[in-house]
Amino acid sequence: MLFYSYFKTLVGKEVTVELKNDLSIAGKLQSVDQFLNIKLNAIRIVNETRYPHMKSVQNCFIRGSVIRYVHLPPEGVDLDLLHDATRREARGA
């Protein structure tokens, strides 16, 4: 639940999602669920020349199991919050 709680704080911010098939999609995070499925708005494809069929897509739903990485904006990372949450979760386990 640590990652789910953290991603909920990033709703409305710009993120880049890299998929297991090497497609990278940047967009505004609209929502995330407990399975880490992600919904993005106002998307753009990072390597548009490689995926020209994706030019017309404006928003998308990405299943959590196909995500390799989520690149976060530097200002969106609150290290103190992450450290505290990690400590709390480790104590509770």
Image (cartoon, rainbow, N blue to C red):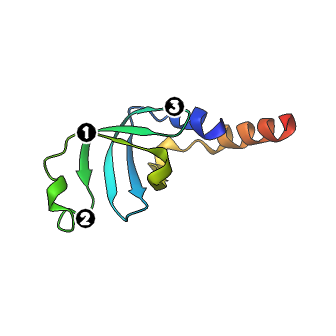
Residue 77 in the image: state x and y as whole percent: 54, 44
In-image side of 55 versus 8 (left or right): left
Q: Is residue 40 above or below residue 73?
A: above
Of residue 44 and residue 21, the one placed in the foreground of this image is 21
Q: Whole-Å distance between the Cαs marked 3 and 2?
A: 27 Å
Q: Whole-Å distance between the Cαs marked 3 and 1?
A: 18 Å
Residue type for callout 2: Asn
Which residue lies at the image location 38% right of the left edge and 32% below the top edge? 12
In-image side of 46 versus 17 (left or right): left
Q: How many marks?
A: 3
Q: Whole-Å distance between the Cαs marked 2 and 1?
A: 17 Å
Please tell me how crowded label 2 is: few (under 14), some (14-19), or many (20+) other residues with Cα within 10 Å.
few
Q: Could you say which disc has been placed on residue 47 in the image?
A: 2
Residue 62 in the image: state x and y as whole percent: 38, 44
Q: In this view, does 47 lie above or below 32?
A: below
Residue 7 in the image: state x and y as whole percent: 52, 37
In-image side of 55 versus 90 (left or right): left
Residue type for callout 1: Asn
Please tell me how crowded label 1 is: few (under 14), some (14-19), or many (20+) other residues with Cα within 10 Å.
some
Residue type for callout 3: Lys
Q: Could you say which disc has been placed on residue 59 in the image?
A: 1
Pointer 3 residue: 8
Residue 29 in the image: state x and y as whole percent: 38, 37
Disc 3 versus disc 1: nearer the observer: 1
Of residue 76 and residue 39, the one placed in the foreground of this image is 39
